Image (cartoon, rainbow, N blue to C red):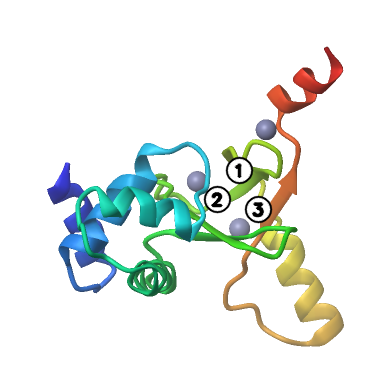
């Protein structure tokens, strides 16, 4: 398991450290996104004296390097998750239960068209994250 995460980091030209590997392992186990405080609690089981700032810094590094994904929640707090899907895709996040689901809709063609025709610019990359209520939360609220 560990070598798989090490390969992920190396593939992104990121230094492999025990703390980064532990964070990737913790986030990959979850189907929901976690707050830095929650990751910290789980990290303390392995690194007894680890401080919250260290967890924050590692989460930011991993997110900037592309190893994990940041969720900027409507509550304005930051959360993180790790998706193993290597294909280009986007995420639907449930603001109630914090479940993360892959969506294959991209919209890149429309975005590129819009930017090149109306702004006369050129798209290099894009970020799309969709917030909503997942199917099981909708069903729970109706019953
Ligand atoms: Zn939900
Ligand atoms: Zn994904
Ligand atoms: Zn896309």
Report the Cα–Cα distance between label 1 and label 3: 6 Å
Find disc 2 in the rendering and name its residue: 89
Q: Residue at x 46, y 60 (%)?
A: 36
Report the Cα–Cα distance between label 1 and label 2: 5 Å
Label 1–label 2 contact, CB within 8 A: yes
Mark 1 surroundings: few (<14), some (14-19) or many (≥20) residues within 10 A: few
Q: Earlier in the sequence, mark 1 or mark 2?
A: 2
Label 2–label 3 contact, CB within 8 A: yes
Tag 2 secondary structure: loop
Disc 2 within 8 angstroms of ligand 2 (CB):
yes
Mark 3 surroundings: few (<14), some (14-19) or many (≥20) residues within 10 A: some
Label 1–label 3 contact, CB within 8 A: yes
Q: Residue at x 17, y 57 (%)?
A: 6
Find disc 3 in the rendering and name its residue: 106
Tag 1 secondary structure: loop
Disc 3 within 8 angstroms of ligand 3 (CB):
yes
Q: Quadrant of the N terminus?
A: top left
Q: Which mark is residue 104?
A: 1
Mark 2 surroundings: few (<14), some (14-19) or many (≥20) residues within 10 A: some
Tell me which image quadrant ligand 1 sits in.
top right
Report the Cα–Cα distance between label 2 and label 3: 7 Å
Q: Residue at x 83, y 12 (%)?
A: 143
Residue extending farthest front: 49
């Amino acid at each position: 398991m560990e070598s798989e995460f090490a390969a992920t980091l190396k593939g992104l030209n990121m230094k492999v450290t025990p703390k980064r590997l532990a964070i990737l392992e913790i986030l990959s186990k979850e189907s929901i996104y976690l707050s830095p405080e929650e990751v910290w609690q789980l990290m303390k089981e392995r690194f007894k004296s680890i401080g919250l700032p260290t967890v924050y810094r590692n989460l930011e590094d991993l997110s900037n390097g592309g190893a994990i994904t940041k969720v900027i929640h409507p509550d304005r707090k930051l959360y993180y998750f790790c998706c193993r899907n290597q294909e280009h895709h986007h995420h639907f996040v449930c603001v109630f239960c914090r479940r993360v689901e892959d969506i294959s809709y991209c919209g890149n063609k429309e975005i590129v068209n819009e930017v090149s025709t109306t702004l006369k610019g050129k798209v290099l990359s894009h970020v799309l994250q969709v917030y909503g209520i997942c199917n099981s939360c909708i069903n729970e609220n109706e019953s």
